[in-house]
Amino acid sequence: MTATFVLIPGAGGSAWYWHRLVPLLEEAGAEAVAVDLPAADDAADLSTYADTVCLAAAGAQREVVVVGQSMGAFTAPMVAARLSASSIVLLNPMVPTAGESPGTWWEATGQGAARRAYFTRIGLGDRAFDEVEDFFHDVPDDVRAEALSQPEPRQSDTPFERVWPLDRWPDVPTRVLQGRDDRCFPLEFQRRIVRERLGLEVEVMPGGHLSALSRPVELAARLLRPLSAS
């Protein structure tokens, strides 16, 4: 494999999120750069996040594939443009649009109503989102226990309050991988948002929101497949 995968986590900014995926990519001959973001820093905005990722990926000699998980979808296109990436892969993403901040994304997309309708449809009823159960519902027990044994990562409000600095999606080939059992961003919701904002169809894979923890083998295969084909 000739690619360097630059792996951007979602809210909380922990590179640990990718720890089950990185060795699988490396075993296949690819490079993997999992980035810790300065999520706890109230002075850090999305541009700071992009600077951090670009610094971590500096010196990559192979073609760069930028992977953004969840909120990482706001940072991924900023990084891809600066690193001349060959492609962007979004994983269960918050797909941004011009003039929008991560904080306004939720209401602008209708995520809340979509999530409530999905909960009703799958029999969870009219209850609030449980950040442990609904994020980790399909993560193996030992991995879940390890995640929950760590201090909860602090996420500053700063990047949620500031508008995404790009005026359009960069001219970089983009794929969107979506877990069919994601309880935060339900599949049909994501299909609508991705069509409206990127003009693309999602690639559906098994699993919930934390695919790199729950389905690392399937995720690695999907990330590597285009490289194998080429």
Image (tube, rainbow, N blue to C red):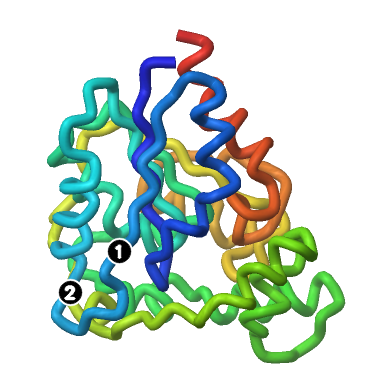
Query: Where is 44 relative to 180, above or below?
Result: below
Residue denoted by label 2: 44
The residue that appears at 62% across and 81% down in the rendered structure is 131
At mark 1, the secondary structure is loop
Q: In which quarter of the image is the N terminus?
A: top left
Q: Quadrant of residue 133?
A: bottom right
Residue 169 appearing in the image:
no
The residue that appears at 58% across and 80% down in the rendered structure is 113
Q: Of marks 2 and 1, which one's residue comes earlier in the chain?
A: 1
Q: Mark 1, residues whose alpha carbon is within 10 Å: few (<14), some, or many (≥20)?
A: many
Residue denoted by label 1: 37
Considering depth in this image, is 98 or 9 the residue closer to the camera?
Answer: 9
Seen from this angle, which residue lies furthest top? Answer: 230
For residue 169, which numbered disc appears in the image? none
Q: Where is residue 47 in the image (x, y as percent from the top left)?
A: 14, 62
Label 2 amino acid? Ala
The residue that appears at 63% across and 77% down in the rendered structure is 149
Considering depth in this image, is 196 or 77 the residue closer to the camera?
Answer: 77
